[in-house]
Amino acid sequence: MTPDELRDAQQDIAVHGARKGDFVRLGDTDLVIRVEGDDREIGNELQIGFGKNARDGIGMRSVRSSESCDVVITNVLVIDALLGIRVTSIGIRNGRISAIGRAGNPDTMDNVDVIVGSGSVIIPGEGLIATAGGIDTHVHAMTPRVCDSALSSGVTTVIAQEFGSFWGVGISSSWALQQGHNMFAHWPLNVGILGRAAGSTRDPLLEGLEGGVCGFKIHEDTGAHPRTIDTTLTFADEYDVAIALHTDGLNEMSSVADTLNVIGDRAVHAFHVEGCGGGHAPDVLTMAGRNNILASSTNPTLAYGINAADEHVAMIISAHGMNPELPSDVEIAHRRVRQATMAAENRLHDMGVIPVTSSDALGMGRADDTWRKTFAMASMFADASILDGSVAPDDVVVSNERVLRHVAKITINPALVHGLSHEVGAIKVGLLADIVLWPYASFASKPNMVIKGGLPAYGVVGDPGATVSNAQPLVIGPQFGAYGASAQELGVHFSNGISQVTVAGRRSVPVQNTRTVRGSDMVRHGILGEVQVDPTGHTVTFNDQIVSSEAITHSPLTRTFLI
Amino acid sequence: MELTPSEQDRLLIFTAAQLAQSRRARGVKLNVPEATALIAHAVIEAARDGASHAQALIAGQNAVAESELLPGVGPLLSGIAVEGVFDDGRRLVVVDFSSTDAHVPGEVTRLEVAAQVSDAATVDIVVRNESTIGISVTTHMHFFEVNPRLSFNRSAAFGMRLHIPAGEHVDFPPGTDVSVQLEPIGGNRVLIGFAGLVDGPLDAPGAKEQALAKAREWGYLDSGQS
């Protein structure tokens, strides 16, 4: 490019953001994506503001929102596991995505997909990335503030296991569940609660179902015995609810092969499949790669780092009601921490074998760290993109597929595993408008705006007495969608097909298709094969090939942005 | 102290700036929140010391040096808005840190020149502002219906808009001839609203003639009139 062309390009990027064919570095990672498409017409972009064209009769049609949209996010770079990487506009009506494509007024602009009305709210998306809201399927709600922490990080759906501060690992009391649903309605967040599957008989499970759970948690702390697993899965098949499994880390009653045998070919969500979060030691990772085992990771072991092992012993003791003065507690805690399985887990994510990431918030994970850790991990394996002009644009190696795979891990795949994908998980017409807007510079680390059910619910807010809305100190905090009756209305309560639980103002939605979902359904994943861990826990193979990764010394998305 | 929410927020800046200051004193390279806090703090304190707005801006710009920052931090220190309490009242200051760091998180790289604005058929017209004040017209405005005091061939501008990139505008200074290029309005070509000269389909039979008649009646200057 000539200096003039370069100057014009820089100005164009500053005004309109990236266009088709442009390369964008995500935050301070090594992930460079190339924009695959752009639904705008150059020279005809819809823009809001002084002297711009989003005006009555020009870019906006003088019609009701029922014939246009309530809200439109314009000209935003979407990164979505289903839609791909493209610049587009997203129309929202009644809290759901109503149209995706070129925004404007069809009376004056060609090929308009998203009709913008004279009364439509316009959220300008230039220079921002839009993803579907994150879905965290592993949250110990040990403090109410965990909901704020999740929202502040771009998570809009939480599958909780308690409403502490007590260690629930599932709640089955229908009285307590009703209180839980009432409490969670305070946040503009979709919430499902897992019942505790600790019963060898169906009665406690039935009570949880009547109490409105969206699934059950089997946990070794309350009994992950073969009989419990079998009873719970039989019950789940009958009522279509998801089952999350934290297996027997002591191998007390069964080894991993026995657990797999009891499960048979029934669908199970295997939590923290690496194992330091809990489960058969040292080989629970062998559960990954099987079609009916939907495996996930929790975030402290992701972007496997040099200090990962060292932080975990104390974390295990503290989270699981153990005592550091008791040598036997310390000994079994140590047995859960294995560098080789952590190193392998990260590689299995990159290969598309493990399809889901989650937090394990306040129970050995960080509620606000899953986006960050998922993309720090993606960056570990990124190939260098050469952007100095020495490589022809079409020959530049980019990370589009890797980035889309990692977006899938925190959006559409957890939605599929827990039967939520008829409501959330993608930027797709018909789904709830749960959308996170990220600056290019802080993608996956700090969002600019968290849109819940079509309205800003969380995001960057500043000095409330200032002349402008972006005066320091900027914090990521509640927006209007987090207040009043709207917080109740913008979030949904995920339940099951027989629950009669109601909470004023909040919609209750049964989960669906939790029993038929398989590993091969996992978007941009579905790589199946045999994971083996040697008895010492020092070597992991996938289809007989050693899988491992180097521990990182510096994590992107972290030091640059966190005080 | 009877601190307002806004004043309490300023204490958050102070706390962050003190933390950043102590880290800097240890030789630690600063990250985005740390450097931002020091810049905002410098502006607020300059204002408190009686500085002018211009002086406070300079204090903010100089609050940190590139050598004190982690790689990739300098380019993100732009548009830092903060309100200080100056001697003449509270004032907004927006600081852009001038960085030469080649590490730019979120950087967009364009290796090929993007396609240009459409090469739709255009017409050239000369427009003269007969009023005493400046008039500006934006890209997608129906040029036929712009300010009555602009004199040009209205007939040639029927159904047309400025042939410039979206979001830009053309200025018409008083008493001056300005040449512009117009291109046809796209889409269904239905104009509702504007000045009310059309209020319907542009290409309906008689629409143009009716609009021209209305413009004449309402006193729109038209150099194209015979």
Image: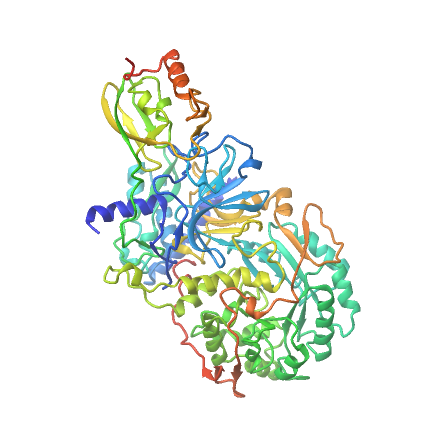
Number of residue marks: 0
Q: Would residue B144 be found to the left or right of residue A140 on screen?
A: left
Colour basis? rainbow
Considering every residue shown, the one lying at the far bottom of the view is A535
Q: Position of residue B215 (x, y in %)?
A: 38, 16
In this rendered view, identify the residue nearer to me: B62 or A500: A500
Above or below, A486 relative to B146: below
Residue B94 screen position, x and y as percent: 35, 41
Percent across and percent down for residue B28 are: 34, 62
Residue A367 seen anywhere in this rendered image of the structure: no
Q: From where the camera sits, is residue A468 visible? A: yes
Question: In the drawing, does residue B22 fall left or right of residue B134?
Answer: right
Q: Is residue A99 above or below residue A170?
A: above
A563 left or right of A426 in image: left
Residue at position x 55%, y 76% in the image = A288
Task: Locate the C terminus of chain A and report the quarter of the image it occupies.
Answer: bottom left
A404 or A208, nearer to the observer: A404
Q: Residue at x 37, y 29 (%)?
A: B141
Q: Quadrant of residue A268?
A: bottom right
Front residue (pair A289, A134): A289
Report the residue that reaches farthest toward the left: A2
Asked if residue B110 lies left or right of residue A364, the reply is left
Q: Position of residue B27 (x, y in %)?
A: 32, 63
In the picture shown, does residue A423 fall above or below B175?
Answer: below
